[in-house]
Amino acid sequence: MKKIIYVIGCLMMGVGIFHSCSEDFLDKPAYGALSDEVLADEKGIEALLIGAYAALDGQDVVNGGTVALGGGNGWEATPSNWIYGDITGGDAHKGSDGGDQPPINAIATYSVDASNGFFNTKWKALYEGVTRTNAVLRLLSEAEDITEESRANLAGQARFLRGHYYFELKKMFNMVPWIDENTENTNIPNDTDIWPNIEADFKFAYENLPATQDEVGRANSWAAGAYLGKTYLYQGKSNEAKNIFTEVINSGVTSNGLSYGLVDNFNHNFNAEFENNEESVFAIQMVANDGTNTIGNSNQALMLAYPYNSPFRCCGFYQPTQDLVNSYRTDEANGLPYIDNYNNNPVKNDMGILSDEPFSPDTQSLDPRLDWTVGRREVPYHDWGYHPGYDWIREQSSGGPYAPKKHIYWQYHADTYSDQSAWAPGNAINVNVIRFADVLLMAAEAEARTGNLNTALEYVNLVRGRMVDNPGNWLKDYIDPENPLDGFSDQYAANYNIERFPDGYFTSEEQAMEVIMYERRIELAMEGHRFFDLVRWGVAEEVLNNYIEYEGQITTDVRGGDFNSNDGYFPIPQRQIDLSTTAEGPVLQQNPGY
């Protein structure tokens, strides 16, 4: 126990516990570390809980620099899953150039092995979060001067966080060891399905957390309910998911007391000025310019993912795919998507066209969410000017012509919400773990699976309806019309055309699910969900191999890729298997196919 508390103390600089770490701390008193007796009161447990929240971003501050928890580069432990959810899911290319960060190349083409260090970094960061939550729960059981209300709140938050960390581990690696506050020997096999444990943690949190919290970043009961519903959905428990989602949709509020709903402006979900709004169910809180002179708390894991050779300085990674862009094509006649053949009418791009050469963007019918999600040539890149195309792309031949957009800060408030303390920028845009549109689409899925097609359609149309009613004006919400920015017209005149699905559109579970799957992609694109959705739906092999075949005709990076049924989960890191080895052999067993 002293070792665990000491390790946590070493990492918990954010709560004022500062000391140096020594390799021989097992043999000597841990000077500067706090004992169980000191921490086992409400104040000490609260400090440990803050440390458990701090692990959500997977980042640490060491000697004035920023790395991933447990070592490795910060992006390897990315909480947004831009590598593990979007690149593997066919929504994004690695970007940059072919030789930069080569471990991602293997991830993108489903040719990884267990020695890929990215997986070890992610594993360690998530288990660090587990360790910190277990420390809270262990000491909470020993504390005596805490009211039952506070005890339930602290335990509920800790178990919510532990559920989150294990949910991430489960969807990435499948069979992982369950270590909780009562585990003494942590070198245990990964031979038991941990879904029941995750479910129990979120159920406890749902039943014990208050509806609101004093601080907005803390989990509340409704966030736990939404996550419980998601856990049911991943297990195929559609009835249970439907019931809990109904409660969340009808009665849920944010931690700061706002009734759940969709914000009028889609882009406000990705703008730090409007964070923690009524659509934010649970978000990892980010902050810029926090006084540490690092970007460890400022979306460091996305520091590579800005347009190259641009005002953002670095580094050209995380470029949306043509396959994703084409999915935003709509039918001119009815404003509905081309679900079965969206690649047959591709969106015009500027591949091979230099920035000083003429180019006119696509004029056909589009879902407006495209231009809040993807940066493309001659379309305003927020308020930074029109995206110039080629000049902001590091290597079109491998990464394509597009740039990411949802995590990009705006120029008009860059002084406040960007952080330039490192060689690449950080920003204060929260990472949305679950937002209300996500809840509505998960609920639609549960309703469709249980035969309630009209309710499923209602939820889908709520999400689409936001864009029908307010597709977005590039300038009106942010720019003083009396002082327009140089180079901007009043509004970019794209041919936006989106409509709700008509009444009775869903005719069967299969057809409804096709629509819901499609809507989840275009609503939640570049938010880290895609790969995990495809795997749980059982369609990953077909969808991703079709993606490779199509996208490989445009860019070189995915050529030769091949997804097979074993690729639905990533390999257990070889380093962890090696560390688990005893005289009888390794305790951790590798996933099939690796």
Image: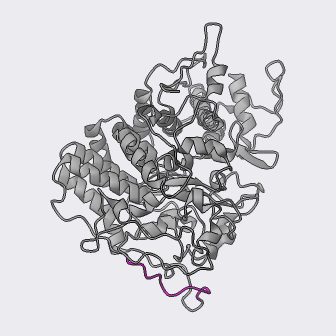
562 vs 496, left or right, is: right
Q: Work out whether residue 187 or residue 330 is closer to the camera in this orientation and state it.
A: 330
569 to 590, vertically: above or below: below
Say if 294 sits above or below 73 in the image.
below
| Residue span colored magenta | 484-496
Question: Dividing the image into 4 quarters, which one contains the N terminus?
Answer: top right
Whole-percent x and y of residue 187? 60, 18
Q: Nearest the camera: 186 or 151?
A: 186
Task: Look at the image and say whether residue 487 sits in the magenta stretch.
Answer: yes
Residue 540: percent from left, percent from top: 39, 42
Q: Is residue 75 visible?
A: yes
- What number of labels is visible? 0
Whether residue 153 sits left or right of residue 144 in the image: it is left
Instruction: Work out whether 98 lies above or below 308.
Output: above
Q: Going 65% across and 39% down the picture, which residue do you hit?
A: 43
Residue 318 seen in render: no
Instruction: Decide whether the magenta segment is chiefly helix, strand or loop.
Output: loop
Residue 230, image x, y percentages: 38, 42
Q: Is residue 38 magenta?
A: no
Q: Quadrant of residue 253?
A: bottom left
